[in-house]
Amino acid sequence: MDLILSILSSSLIFILFRSFPGFKIDILQAVVANYFVAFTCGIMLFSNDLSTLKNQEIMQASPYAFMCGVLFISLFVIMGISSQKNGVATTSIAVKMSMALSVLFVLIAQFNVINFNNLIPLILALAGVFLVSYQGQTKEGSGSLWMLGVLFLGSACLDLVLFFVQDSWLPNFHQGIFASLGFGMAGCLGLLYLIYLSFHKKLKFDLRSWLGGIVLGIPNYFSIYLLVKAYNTLGIEPQQVLSIANVGVVLASALVGFLLFKEPFSWKKGWGMVLCLLALSLSVISFEEIFS
């Protein structure tokens, strides 16, 4: 259930980004507001657990939270702009195909043998995600396409940082509080940038954008917290969690695009969804179980 809710929360983020232009919401201000809301969510939900943490434990977690904060704010801003310039589906493919790097690095870090049980579902997932998300030649110039490359590499780094935090770096630290600390760091970094822009008269405060960020912050918090929690609650391998989470978001965002935003449906997307579903099945059920 944790992973399903994380997938739904991540999909809602793409929907909100897609809807923001219609409400004339400034992405940067909304993103900064969203992080303070996400930080508040964690603090309110786990206030009792926070009181039991020692200052030394919080100081130990701070560098990793700062690392996540930098990735959160930079990737989120780029993802929001790219969703508008390149489209929701194209942005989704850049973010979610990064699972190839994430899964391979997790396998290597855990000294797992790369075989058919973990390689075939990954290949099917990549093929499925590509077919679902690929829209052909974009009309924008290279100025918007660079975002896709940054999202691809940056999203893989974020997946790996979140995995290593719960697996090796801070295995006993409260997952919900760590997510909240990361969001708080991201919010502070974003606020400093807003102050800089305001000082140079390049930014005008927009209440509507901050309200949009409040709405965005709630699903954003749970998308990360529930994903980290799923590593320990599902009872499956971490690379399986990553694959299911990424492919699940692509499927959900594609369905929303078809149904809510009336995005065109094609045979490529249909076959892509079939491959994604097959990859999800094989991520949970091994070949030995199928043919035993």
Image (cartoon, rainbow, N blue to C red):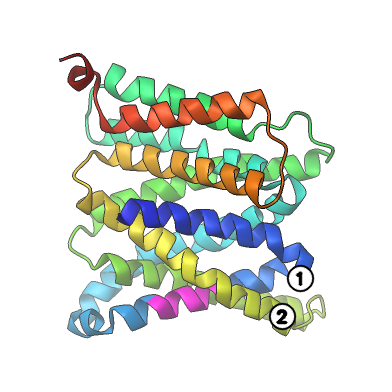
Q: Secondary structure at mark 2?
A: helix
Q: Main secondary structure of the magenta part?
A: helix
Location of residue 104 in the rendering, given as x and y in whole percent from the top left corner: 37, 31
* x 26%, y 55%: residue: 166
Where residue 272 appears, as percent x and y from the top left, is: 55, 27
Residue drawn at (28%, 57%), measured in percent from left and top?
229
- Residue bearing mark 1: 23
Q: In the image, which residues are magenta?
A: 33-41
Q: Is residue 189 visible?
A: no
The residues bearing labels 1 and 2 have C-alpha atoms spaced at a distance of 8 Å
* Location of mark 2 (residue): 208
Name the residue located 41 percent from the left edge and 47 percent from the top edge: 159
- Exactly how many numbered labels are in the figure? 2
- Amino acid residing under circle 1: Phe
Labelled pair 1, 2 in contact (Cβ < 8 Å): yes
Residue 169 coordinates in the image, percent (x, y): 25, 55
**Which three-letter amino acid code belongs to the residue tagged 2?**
Arg
Q: Nearer the viewer, residue 288 or 63?
A: 288
Marker disc for residue 173: none
Query: x, y percentage for residue 270?
Result: 58, 28
Quadrant of the image for the N terminus?
bottom left
Instruction: Please tell me whether mark 1 sits on a helix, a strand or a loop.
Output: helix
Query: Does residue 38 belong to the magenta stretch?
Result: yes
Of the numbered discs 1 and 2, the one sitting upstream in the chain is: 1
